Image: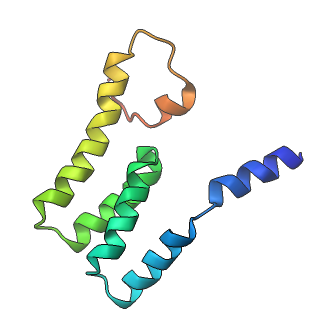
Amino acid sequence: MSGDGATEQAAEYVPEKVKKAEKKLEENPYDLDAWSILIREAQNQPIDKARKTYERLVAQFPSSGRFWKLYIEAEVNILFYFFLHRNCNIHYSDRKQIRNIDN
Protein backbone atom coordinates (compact mmCIF):
# COMPACT_ATOMS: atom_id res chain seq x y z
CA MET A 1 0.00 0.00 0.00
CA SER A 2 2.87 2.42 0.59
CA GLY A 3 3.55 2.26 -3.17
CA ASP A 4 0.10 3.74 -3.84
CA GLY A 5 0.82 6.72 -1.59
CA ALA A 6 4.15 7.32 -3.29
CA THR A 7 2.43 7.20 -6.68
CA GLU A 8 -0.17 9.74 -5.54
CA GLN A 9 2.54 12.06 -4.17
CA ALA A 10 4.53 11.81 -7.39
CA ALA A 11 1.41 12.59 -9.44
CA GLU A 12 0.68 15.65 -7.30
CA TYR A 13 4.23 17.01 -7.30
CA VAL A 14 4.43 20.55 -8.66
CA PRO A 15 7.90 21.99 -9.31
CA GLU A 16 8.79 25.10 -7.31
CA LYS A 17 9.30 27.13 -10.50
CA VAL A 18 5.72 26.32 -11.54
CA LYS A 19 4.38 27.39 -8.16
CA LYS A 20 6.27 30.68 -8.45
CA ALA A 21 4.98 31.22 -11.99
CA GLU A 22 1.40 30.60 -10.85
CA LYS A 23 1.85 33.13 -8.05
CA LYS A 24 3.20 35.70 -10.54
CA LEU A 25 0.16 35.13 -12.75
CA GLU A 26 -2.15 35.79 -9.82
CA GLU A 27 -0.51 39.22 -9.55
CA ASN A 28 -0.24 39.83 -13.29
CA PRO A 29 -2.11 37.45 -15.65
CA TYR A 30 -0.17 38.88 -18.62
CA ASP A 31 3.32 38.01 -17.27
CA LEU A 32 4.91 36.35 -20.29
CA ASP A 33 7.91 35.07 -18.33
CA ALA A 34 5.57 33.19 -15.99
CA TRP A 35 3.56 31.85 -18.93
CA SER A 36 6.79 30.65 -20.58
CA ILE A 37 7.54 28.53 -17.51
CA LEU A 38 4.06 27.02 -17.56
CA ILE A 39 4.26 26.37 -21.32
CA ARG A 40 7.59 24.54 -20.96
CA GLU A 41 6.12 22.46 -18.15
CA ALA A 42 3.01 21.67 -20.23
CA GLN A 43 5.13 20.60 -23.19
CA ASN A 44 6.69 17.91 -21.00
CA GLN A 45 3.38 16.49 -19.82
CA PRO A 46 0.78 14.23 -21.42
CA ILE A 47 -1.90 16.27 -23.14
CA ASP A 48 -4.57 15.27 -20.62
CA LYS A 49 -2.54 17.02 -17.91
CA ALA A 50 -1.28 19.88 -20.08
CA ARG A 51 -4.65 20.74 -21.62
CA LYS A 52 -5.72 22.88 -18.64
CA THR A 53 -2.61 25.08 -19.01
CA TYR A 54 -3.13 25.47 -22.76
CA GLU A 55 -6.80 26.35 -22.28
CA ARG A 56 -5.90 28.98 -19.70
CA LEU A 57 -3.21 30.34 -22.03
CA VAL A 58 -5.49 30.81 -25.03
CA ALA A 59 -8.25 32.20 -22.82
CA GLN A 60 -5.81 34.84 -21.54
CA PHE A 61 -4.40 35.57 -25.01
CA PRO A 62 -7.26 34.68 -27.40
CA SER A 63 -5.79 36.53 -30.38
CA SER A 64 -2.30 35.05 -30.08
CA GLY A 65 -1.77 32.75 -33.02
CA ARG A 66 1.49 31.58 -31.48
CA PHE A 67 -0.22 30.29 -28.35
CA TRP A 68 -3.08 28.69 -30.28
CA LYS A 69 -0.45 26.95 -32.44
CA LEU A 70 1.26 25.50 -29.35
CA TYR A 71 -2.06 24.15 -28.08
CA ILE A 72 -3.09 22.69 -31.42
CA GLU A 73 0.30 21.05 -31.93
CA ALA A 74 0.06 19.41 -28.51
CA GLU A 75 -3.38 18.00 -29.37
CA VAL A 76 -2.34 16.90 -32.85
CA ASN A 77 0.79 15.14 -31.60
CA ILE A 78 -1.27 12.59 -29.70
CA LEU A 79 -3.34 11.99 -32.85
CA PHE A 80 -0.20 11.33 -34.91
CA TYR A 81 1.09 9.00 -32.24
CA PHE A 82 -2.17 7.09 -32.24
CA PHE A 83 -2.44 6.74 -36.02
CA LEU A 84 1.21 5.80 -36.45
CA HIS A 85 0.92 3.12 -33.79
CA ARG A 86 -2.66 2.09 -34.51
CA ASN A 87 -1.80 -1.51 -35.27
CA CYS A 88 0.55 -1.83 -32.31
CA ASN A 89 -0.41 -2.60 -28.77
CA ILE A 90 -0.83 0.82 -27.23
CA HIS A 91 -0.71 1.04 -23.46
CA TYR A 92 -4.09 1.82 -21.90
CA SER A 93 -2.88 5.11 -20.39
CA ASP A 94 -2.02 6.35 -23.90
CA ARG A 95 -5.41 5.29 -25.23
CA LYS A 96 -7.19 7.21 -22.46
CA GLN A 97 -5.86 10.44 -23.93
CA ILE A 98 -7.53 9.82 -27.24
CA ARG A 99 -11.18 10.80 -27.18
CA ASN A 100 -13.48 9.03 -29.65
CA ILE A 101 -10.94 8.92 -32.47
CA ASP A 102 -11.91 5.41 -33.58
CA ASN A 103 -15.55 6.43 -34.10
Name the residue: 72% across, 57% down: 9
Name the residue: 41% across, 84% down: 24
103 to 2, vertically: above or below: above
Q: Position of residue 19 (x, y in %)?
A: 52, 74
Residue 54 lies in what quarter of the image? bottom left
Q: Position of residue 82 (x, y in %)?
A: 37, 24
Name the residue: 68% across, 53% down: 10
Q: Quadrant of the N terminus?
A: top right
Q: Quadrant of the C terminus?
A: top left
Q: Position of residue 65 (x, y in %)?
A: 11, 58
75 to 22, vertically: above or below: above
Q: Position of residue 38 (x, y in %)?
A: 39, 65
The image shows a total of numbered marks equal to 0
Q: Spot the residue most to the top.
A: 87
Name the residue: 19% across, 71% down: 61
Colour mode of the rendering: rainbow
| Relative horizontal placement of residue 42, taking residue 11 as reference (left or right) | left
86 to 92, vertically: above or below: above
Q: Nearer the viewer, residue 30 or 100?
A: 30
